Image (cartoon, rainbow, N blue to C red):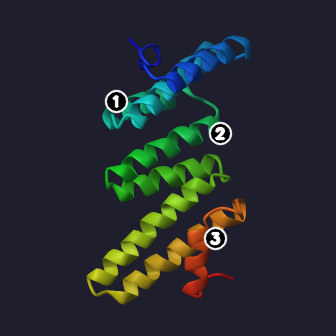
Amino acid sequence: MPRSRINENFIDKTFSIVANILLRIIPTTSGEKRAFTYYRDGMSAQSEGNYAEALQNYYEAMRLEIDPYDRSYILYNIGLIHTSNGEHTKALEYYFRALERNPFLPQAFNNMAVICHYRGEQAIRQGDSEVADSWFNQAAEYWKQAIALTPGNYIAAQNWLKITGRFE
């Protein structure tokens, strides 16, 4: 049974009802409808921490979805799962792929910056300040892009950029 039919909480049920109504009234192909159902099921599984199930749903949604904008959000969510699992190289790859399809995803730039910043901190702990500085510079570039897209967000990142002299 699809996950969308077994949602138990009020918000998931409400979202499912609204999504089903929209799918009926908005002109979409059957493939697009199926892609959205897999995407929705993936989000539900991801929110419950069932990452393997979420990935299966997202991969199936990717197989069916043709719209680049919609695919960008699927790829972004796959990146989130890899980030949560500590698979930062894979996560970066999916964030890049999402941004190729939709360059207006500040959250993808932010997550890429967070990963780069984390890697910079790891390099400092290992005593490699040159590598750390490179990672921090990359984090700064991604945060600048996120901030340019949503100037009121990422205040902590803006403060870090100012404190470290990377804000221009």
Element at label 2: helix
Element at label 1: helix
Disc 3 marks a residue whose amino acid type is Lys
**Dot 3: within a 10 Å radius of its alpha carbon, few (fewer than 14), some, or many (20 or more) residues?**
many
* Residue at the extreme left: 126
Disc 2 marks a residue whose amino acid type is Tyr
Where residue 118 sits: x, y (%)?
A: 39, 70
Q: Nearer the viewer, residue 36 or 158?
A: 158
User: Which of the two discs, 1 and 2, labels the residue nearer the N terminus?
Assistant: 1
Disc 1 versus disc 2: nearer the observer: 1
Q: How far apart are marks 1 and 2 (CA)?
A: 23 Å
Q: Which of 34 and 54 is in front in this view?
A: 54
Q: Determine the image quadrant of residue 129.
A: bottom left
Q: Do callouts 1 and 2 mark residues in contact (Cβ within 8 Å)?
A: no
Q: Is residue 34 above or below residue 139?
A: above
Q: Name the residue under label 3.
A: 144
Taking the image as shown, residue 106 lies to the left or right of residue 148, namely left
Q: Mark 2 points at which residue?
A: 69
Q: Do callouts 1 and 3 mark residues in contact (Cβ within 8 Å)?
A: no
Disc 1 marks a residue whose amino acid type is Glu
